[in-house]
């Protein structure tokens, strides 16, 4: 499952506007890579370029390459839909489908990939995904209730269960805890630690302590000024970034001197 | 136990009286008044219908028009009303939903705006215009196709024939009604589709849904109650439509599923409009009685729609 992602000289444009400039990095399998940086520096845009979700904005395009285990995600014959089936995503705000039950929410992606799956197999996969998301014990008695009836933290874990149910190679998380209280945040962070064993995880966060707690590698995005493209300033082992960063801007940011 | 909860030996202090603000009271009074007014109007209409229909209800059957009793008089009309409205909705609801989907999720922005305006304009056209269009354009145009239908699909009772030579058939009424209710349904559904949270659309796309799968997962379920509600609005209009039906339909009474022959049941509303000027005495009471039936059917249809929506209320996304 878990795959390595290699990004080379990636520029991301929204029409003529260069949003992110010249990113090159490698994301190791079975590790957690965190991106930090001030608002508007392009870290979410970069994250969304890893499963081509940024293309939902009209006229968005990239230059450069993103290669996942020898597969060029932006190759000429690559369908963004198939990319997204391999690269799952969890969003800033929990977004279970309100019209579906908890069970249906987890099964939603499975039904897309395999419409003929038997009920027994489906139930088993749903249970396994919910267990993997540390949610099974809390919801096993109300699988047919709407997902929107859960608490915010539970909803977010439901969304994680939904994303991992299709067994993606990579899991992207766009500030997954920014709408959650500290207890729920703790639960998600524990979960990220567990999931690391099976998945390549990329997380964007505004919370530097969170990056320090959950990630193995941390990248710092910054922009030179308003209207300038965001750039990857530095990426390294998390312990190194938070103790002896190579770049002065990184040190200023993590020590709270700006941003 | 929360700290504020009163205990047995120390009763809660009396609550300070909430200050009454004139603005709040005026507005509460106004909106309550409006709410009561609508109930009073509804009750008034029901009472009028009952009182005026009563003589026909208790009258001996040979004094009712048609000499067969009230039930026999109203039943074909009710049948004509239901069959025309039902088939009109069957055509209009899917079409309107597709139009709404196209406008909100497929069309380029400029085209979708223009289309939206056109749809809203269509809703504003008076029904008499649709009726004229039905009789002068649509009815002659259906003569050929209905002949073909009888020949090739005559085994379906709906197209049993023999086809009408003038085209003033139930089929034309159904199509006219469908076109009439199309704009209102698609306008309401369009607004609902437009409100689909971006988050849910992205959730399905991130799972690897195609555009159509995204619509099936996020947009359609979200708009479901709006589709039902809008359809009921349209159905209400189709049930009560008077002029378009009165103009188009060539009536001979009789209950039949055959949509393309020249022998058609009338509808309640069209029958009232056509018969009323020449009616006196008990005939008028019989017409009002048919109106009472229409009133009851409309209420029943709306309650049914409510029940459908409420059945999955907890999954509506409103919580």
Image (tube, grey):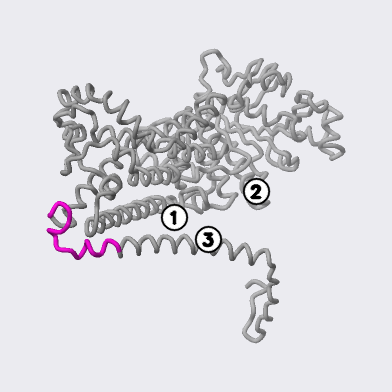
Residue A95 is situated, as x and y percent measured from the top left of the image, at 56, 42
**Closer to the camera: disc 1 or disc 2?**
2
Residue ranking furthest to the bottom? B9
Q: Position of residue A72 (x, y in %)?
A: 57, 16
Residue ID for mark 1: A141
Disc 3 crowd rating (10 Å Cα; few below 14, some 14-19, many 20+) is: few
Residue identifier under label 3: B34
N-terminal label among 1 and 2: 1
What is the spatial separation of the Cα atoms under label 3 and label 1, in whole angstroms?
45 Å
Q: SS for tag 2?
A: loop
Q: Chain of mark 1?
A: A
In-image side of A78 versus A116 (left or right): right
Give the residues drawn in magenta, as a range: B52-67
Protein chain holding label 2: A
The circle on residue B81 is: none
In the rendered structure, are the residues bearing label 1 and label 2 in contact, judged by CB atoms less than 8 Å apart? no
Mark 3 belongs to which subunit? B
């Amino acid at each position: 499952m878990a795959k390595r992602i290699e990004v080379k000289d990636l520029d991301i444009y929204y029409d003529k506007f260069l949003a992110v400039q010249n990113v090159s990095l490698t994301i190791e399998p079975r590790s957690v890579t965190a991106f930090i940086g001030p608002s508007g520096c392009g870290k979410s845009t970069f994250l969304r370029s890893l499963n081509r979700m940024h293309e939902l904005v009209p006229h968005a395009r990239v230059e450069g390459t993103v290669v996942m285990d020898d597969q060029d995600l932006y190759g000429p014959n690559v369908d963004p839909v198939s990319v997204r089936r391999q690269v799952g995503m969890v969003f800033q705000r929990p977004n279970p489908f309100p019209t579906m039950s908890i069970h249906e929410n987890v099964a939603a992606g499975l039904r897309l990939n395999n419409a003929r799956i038997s009920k027994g197999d489906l139930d088993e996969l749903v249970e396994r995904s919910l267990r993997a998301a540390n949610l099974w014990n809390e919801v096993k008695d109300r699988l047919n209730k709407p997902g929107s009836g859960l608490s915010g933290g539970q909803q977010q874990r439901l969304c994680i269960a939904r994303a991992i149910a299709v067994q993606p190679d990579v899991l992207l998380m766009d500030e997954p805890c920014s709408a959650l209280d500290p207890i729920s945040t703790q639960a998600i962070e524990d979960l990220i630690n567990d999931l690391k064993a099976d998945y390549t995880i990329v997380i964007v966060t505004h919370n530097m302590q969170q990056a320090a707690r959950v990630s193995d590698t941390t990248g710092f995005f910054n922009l030179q000024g308003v209207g300038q493209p965001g750039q990857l300033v530095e990426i390294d082992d998390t312990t190194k970034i938070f103790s002896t960063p190579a770049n002065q801007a990184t040190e200023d940011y993590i020590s709270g001197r700006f941003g | 136990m929360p700290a504020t909860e009163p205990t047995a030996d120390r009763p809660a202090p009396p609550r300070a009286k909430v200050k009454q603000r004139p603005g709040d009271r005026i507005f509460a009074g106004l909106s309550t008044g409006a709410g009561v007014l609508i109930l009073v109007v509804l009750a008034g209409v029901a009472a009028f219908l009952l009182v005026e229909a009563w003589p026909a209800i208790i009258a001996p059957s040979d004094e009712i028009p048609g000499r067969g009793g009230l039930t026999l008089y109203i039943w074909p009309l009710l049948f004509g009303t239901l069959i025309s409205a039902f088939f009109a909705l069957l055509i209009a609801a899917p079409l309107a939903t597709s139009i709404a989907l196209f406008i909100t999720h497929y069309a380029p922005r400029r085209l979708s705006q223009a289309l939206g305006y056109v749809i809203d304009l269509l809703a504003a056209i008076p029904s008499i215009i649709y009726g004229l269009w039905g009789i002068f354009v649509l009815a002659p145009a259906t003569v050929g196709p209905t002949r073909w239908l009888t020949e090739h699909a005559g085994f379906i009772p709906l197209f049993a024939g023999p086809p009408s030579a003038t085209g003033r058939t139930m089929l034309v009424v159904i199509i006219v009604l469908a076109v009439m209710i199309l704009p209102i349904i698609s306008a309401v559904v369009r607004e609902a589709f437009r409100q689909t949270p971006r988050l849910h659309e992205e959730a399905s796309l991130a799972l690897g849904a195609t555009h159509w799968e995204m619509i099936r997962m996020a947009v359609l379920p979200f708009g479901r109650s709006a589709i039902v509600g809008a359809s009921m609005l349209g159905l209400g209009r189709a049930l009560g439509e008077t002029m378009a039906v009165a103009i188009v339909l060539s009536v001979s009474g009789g209950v039949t599923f055959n949509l393309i022959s020249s022998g058609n049941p009338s509808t309640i509303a069209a029958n009232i409009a056509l018969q009323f000027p020449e009616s006196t005495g008990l005939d008028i009471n019989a017409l009002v009685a048919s109106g009472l039936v229409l009133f009851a059917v409309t209420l029943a249809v709306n309650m049914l729609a409510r029940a459908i929506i409420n059945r999955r209320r907890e999954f509506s996304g409103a919580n």
